[in-house]
Image (spheres, grey):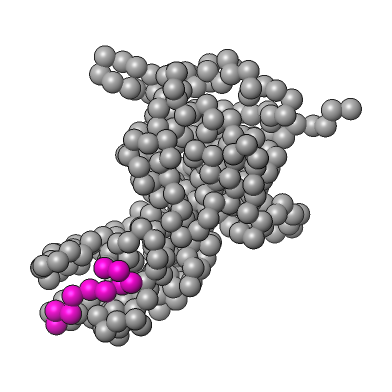
């Protein structure tokens, strides 16, 4: 007797994967994805799960994604959570790492996989990477479930809040600079069991955290940066500031700049220090320039990505807790997003 097929819910939010040619370039086309999925024979083999496609209206170019869209996707999955064994989100590549990071912080107690994927070339083109990314995402969700939010691209399943887009127009568009892939789907599927929780029964119900759009400033340091640049950013109605510093978290020791950060901390603006480097982490104890930041209340982001830092701050600022409690949470590893 043939065992029951797993059921996967596909959230088709938009992006390159489902676009078609037009006189003005690639554009999303209503119902095109549904029609194409019916025509791909591999999707309907016995080894593959059954699936339901929910096409969003309107389809969203990922450059237009915002926190309200993250919440919409989370609510869609939450509403259908009990009816399916896993979830695949089709998404544009430009902000895919932001969405996968945000969803990792929104969901609590996941015991089913949520995989975000897309493509660099539309499904309608002969050399598209869409076919493999979609097919393998569905296969992994059904047969190798990793019970967290992840991102699949070019044969690698990455932790969602560790992923980063590193290539604008190459097939190997995403990387996880400070954490190996959770799964590598080459000729053989290799699961990195040391990094994931294997499927298990859990009695704790899934829930979603409240997340609202928050005013957050981001400043990248460069040689000769003016204190006025930082000041102007803090003058906006920001609740948090991400500073992208040099190396292991170093910044200019200009007294006016340090004083500005001190005052921002006293005014209950969260300040998170992340490195500009692709790999490695912030260590503010290593150099005097980093220690000064620590002394005025700046929080270390360790090896967190900008995408995860930003979305984590959206979550923390949405919680009804004190400034000190927010600082404590900011420094904690909530969903595997940092390595101490």
Q: Is residue 9 at all visible to an observer of this figure?
A: no
Classify residue 235 by image quadrant: bottom left
User: Residue 314 vs residue 340: left or right?
Assistant: left
User: Residue 261 vs residue 323: left or right?
Assistant: left
Residue 161: horizontal and vertical position, in percent? 47, 55
User: Residue 14 vs residue 334: left or right?
Assistant: left
Q: Is residue 22 magenta?
A: no
Q: Is residue 218 at all visible to an observer of this figure?
A: yes
Q: Which residues are magenta?
A: 246-255
Judging depth in this view, the residue of 334 and 223 nearest the camera is 223
Residue at 40% in and 65% down: 280
Residue at 35% in and 54% down: 213
Classify residue 326 by image quadrant: bottom left
Residue at 74% in and 54% down: 200
User: Magenta-highlighted stretch: main secondary structure?
Assistant: loop
Q: Is residue 73 above or below residue 220?
A: above
Judging depth in this view, the residue of 63 and 131 nearest the camera is 131
Residue 143: horizontal and vertical position, in percent? 70, 40
Q: Is residue 171 above or below residue 67?
A: above
Classify the position of the N terminus by image quarter.
top right
Judging depth in this view, the residue of 297 and 215 nearest the camera is 297
Report the number of numbered marks. Answer: 0
Residue 163: horizontal and vertical position, in percent? 45, 51
Q: Residue furthest front?
A: 187
Residue at 34% in and 17% down: 21
Residue 104: horizontal and vertical position, in percent? 51, 54
């Amino acid at each position: 007797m043939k065992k029951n097929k797993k059921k996967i819910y596909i959230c088709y939010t938009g992006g390159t994967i489902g676009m078609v040619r037009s006189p003005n370039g690639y554009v999303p086309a209503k119902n095109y994805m549904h029609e194409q999925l019916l025509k791909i024979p591999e999707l309907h083999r016995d080894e593959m799960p059954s699936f339901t496609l929910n096409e969003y209206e309107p389809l969203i170019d990922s450059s237009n994604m915002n926190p309200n869209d993250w919440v919409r996707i989370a609510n869609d999955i939450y509403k259908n959570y009990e009816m399916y064994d896993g979830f695949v989100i089709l998404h544009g590549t430009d902000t895919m790492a932001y969405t996968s990071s945000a969803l990792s912080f929104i969901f609590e107690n996941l015991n089913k996989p949520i995989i975000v994927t897309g493509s660099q070339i539309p499904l309608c083109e002969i050399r598209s990477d869409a076919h493999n990314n979609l097919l393998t995402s569905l296969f992994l969700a059904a047969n190798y479930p990793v019970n967290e939010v992840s991102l699949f691209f070019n044969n690698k399943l990455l932790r969602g809040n560790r992923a980063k887009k590193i290539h604008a127009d190459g097939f190997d568009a995403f990387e996880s600079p400070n954490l190996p892939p959770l799964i590598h789907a080459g000729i053989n599927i290799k699961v990195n069991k040391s990094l994931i929780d294997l499927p298990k029964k859990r009695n704790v119900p899934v829930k979603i955290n409240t997340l609202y759009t928050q005013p957050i400033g981001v400043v990248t340091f460069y040689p000769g940066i003016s204190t006025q640049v930082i000041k102007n950013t803090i003058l906006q109605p920001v609740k948090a500031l991400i500073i992208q510093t040099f190396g292991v978290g170093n910044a200019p020791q200009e007294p006016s700049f340090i004083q500005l950060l001190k005052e921002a901390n006293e005014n209950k603006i969260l300040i998170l220090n992340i490195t500009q480097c692709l790999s490695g982490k912030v260590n503010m104890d290593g150099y005097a320039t980093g220690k000064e930041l620590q002394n005025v209340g700046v929080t270390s982001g360790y090896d967190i990505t900008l995408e995860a830092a930003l979305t984590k701050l959206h979550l923390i600022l949405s919680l009804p807790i004190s400034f000190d409690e927010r600082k404590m949470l900011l420094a904690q590893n909530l969903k595997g997003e940092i390595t101490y």
